[in-house]
Amino acid sequence: MPLPPRPRSSPPQERSADANGRTSRQETRPSNVILLIPDGFGPASAALAREYLRHQGQASQLALDPFQVGSVRTRAADHRITDSAAAATAYATGTKTNNGHIATAPDGTTLPTLLETAQQRGMATGLVATSRITHATPAAFSAHTPARDREDVIARQQIEQDIDVMLGGGRRHFLPATHDEGGRKDKENLIEEARRRGYRIAQTASDLNGSGARPLLGLFSNDHMAYELDRANTAQPSLARMTDAALNLLSTREDGFFLMVEGSRIDHAAHDNDPATQLHETLAFDRAVRTVLNNTSSDTLVVAVADHETGGLTLGRTQDGQTASTWYPDVFDGVSASSSALFTVLSESRSPNHGTPFVHGIDEWIANATGLTDLTATETRSLADASHPRDVAALLNRRAQIGWTTNGHTATDVHLYARGPGAHCFLGHHDNTSVGTMLLDLLGPDHKVHPAPSPPYQTRA
Ligand SMILES: [Zn+2]
């Protein structure tokens, strides 16, 4: 059955009450929906990045700050602390599921996603991420499997989904194991398959130049894309550049578009308890947000929300028996590489094939990479003995007087932001599934298909 026509540019209407005083969201249908997901971004991540911008005199707030409308509870069906798969499934489908599940219910049933719903309405669709595009968050919008690590299966489903724009990392899941970069045991070459289906293929930032045409598959790295701090030595585009390219390609569709943009590696930096890398991942996400806000019209709903907090980041810590009355954003001024990249150099320097024991030049080297020119003997020794990127990051955390409680995720609530038609629906505190349900209601052909979320996880103005 054909879907009813949808007005494109009529102004959004206010909510109206029916005879029983209930309000309907049916009339505030946006022409386009953009969902921005900063993976692992908690309230302290926002405070850290904002305070750093202020310290640098660059800005007084993050791009999303004026649009903060509430907070979100993130738990999964089977754990109070969610993983990215269950969390993204909540946003993509409005359904609570178990950790590890990609757009499938706890019993394995396939759940229709926002992206599929948008396609049924004739909308163009796009996914942008800095992780492998087959990783949990983008996967939950474009594939169905109860096991998030089946990324070869996810890649095939994504190619068959006819998504208009897919940009991110993860070439290894699209190429056969016989290929230099490939990892697929089934010998399929999904990049060739994508070409056969009419996709334009991009592999470097410069491939995004020019107008081009849909559909576009951009796979810019074999694994995850480089951290923003380490990106200068690569040919990879920034998250903002990918977002801009996706908006250019999608906004020409008469029937509107759905786009999901993930700042994927805020989470990875937090798993390493690496504050400078998380800061720069957040700032890269912030630039992508500015790209979205500056290039979308008033008929576009923009919602931003993290899937969960990672690391238990806090600004201020007890150190050497002293409680802190400040923390020091200036510690990050001179950092020019991720702790992960620094640890790789340290590890290689300790290999038997390496000429000089690296520890003798460690002070000068760390000064170059971090701007810290006054290492104590204890700090030099701890770097020389580092057995994980976290041991390198620990130097920055102590200097900046900031702390982390875990190497994993936490159950901390996350900020919720919204702008555009229907944004008022997101006011208050929500369960993560309510966010997905409201997005489906706003975007879908018939809001009765997806019942409104129920209290107590929702506060309405
Ligand atoms: Zn996550």
Image (cartoon, helix red, strand yellow):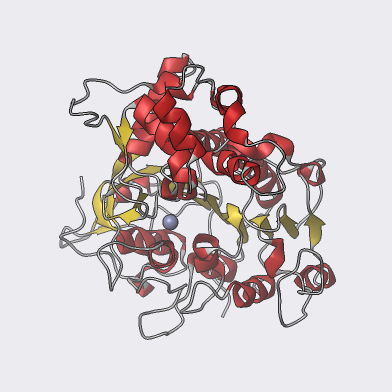
Q: Is residue 78 above or below residue 391?
A: below
Mark yes or no: residue 295 visible: no
Q: Nearer the viewer, residue 441 or 13?
A: 441
Q: Residue furthest top?
A: 57
Q: Quadrant of the C terminus?
A: top left
- Left or right, 144 with respect to 396, comes to right
Residue located 52% across and 48% down the image: 265
Q: Quadrant of the N terminus?
A: bottom right
Q: Is residue 275 above or below residue 203?
A: above
Indicate the quadrant where residue 193 lies.
Answer: bottom right
Indicate the quadrant where residue 357 lies.
Answer: top right
Q: Position of residue 213 (x, y in %)?
A: 80, 53
Which quadrant does ligand 1 occupy?
bottom left
Q: Position of residue 247 (x, y in %)?
A: 64, 46
- Left or right, 249 with respect to 294, comes to right
Q: Nearer the viewer, residue 145 or 416?
A: 145
Q: Nearer the viewer, residue 130 or 260?
A: 130
Q: Position of residue 71 (x, y in %)?
A: 27, 47
- Left or right, 64 with respect to 258, comes to left
Residue located 51% across and 46% down the image: 300
Q: Position of residue 441 (x, y in %)?
A: 39, 63
Q: Is residue 116 above or below residue 304?
A: below
Residue located 15% across and 60% down the image: 456
Residue located 48% across and 70% down the image: 113
Total number of numbered discs in the rendering: 0
Mark yes or no: residue 288 visible: yes
